[in-house]
Image (cartoon, rainbow, N blue to C red):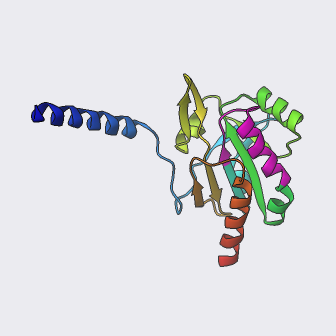
Amino acid sequence: MKVSVILVLTLTLGALFAFAADQPQPPTAGNQAPAFSLLSQEGTQVSLDQFKGKWVVLYFYPKDFTSGCTIEAHNFQRDLDKYTQKNAVILGVSVDDVDSHKSFCTKEGLNFKLLADSKHAVVEKYGSIMEYNGMTLAARNTFLIDPTGVIRKVYLKVSPQAHSEEVLSDLQQLQSAK
């Protein structure tokens, strides 16, 4: 009896570790941010390299027009002038397409770049991919990247309500430390 329980536990743990090993892991603070180039809501290519010399708030979110994603986007929009004063740009990424982003920005009055990762390449590079109800979506993670392209802070499984304030506070601390 004990042998079969141990065998079942061993097989279950093995399966869980195998599943976890298949999932891309997010890059960690202190590492160079993975390069990318995606289309924005305007249909123009946007790459991380374009923002050398600026702080970048790279946030991943599941889906345009959903409640949590709308709250998070509104809060970044509300604080956009504060980010601009701190030499920072906001870049949102989801697996939605350019047309969806364009409609979302128009409807919600968003003036920062939303990037379309329909092929899931960047969400995978940043370990920010998830499955939900049979759909592949971006996980709600954020990466604060310094002007040299190094990740300074990683936020996983973000709560959208107070996230912008949290990022602004951390940005202030990081800039004051230099």
The residue under the point 16% across, 37% down is 6
Q: Estimate the x, y position of residue 122 in percent, counting from the top left.
A: 59, 39
- Figure quadrant of the C terminus: bottom right
The residue furthest front is 1
Q: What stretch of residues is rendered in magenta?
A: 59-78
Q: Is residue 178 visible?
A: no
Q: Position of residue 100 (x, y in %)?
A: 77, 28
- From this viewpoint, is residue 38 visible? yes
Q: Is residue 44 above or below residue 82?
A: above
The residue closer to the viewer here, 155 or 67, is: 67
* Residue 61 appears left or right of 132: right
Look at 72% across and 39% down and name the residue there: 69
Residue 164 on image: x %, y %:
73, 55
Quarter of the image for the N terminus: give it: top left
Horizontal placement of 64 versus 35: left or right? Answer: right
Q: Quadrant of the rendered structure where residue 17 is?
A: top left
Main secondary-structure element of the magenta-colored stretch = helix
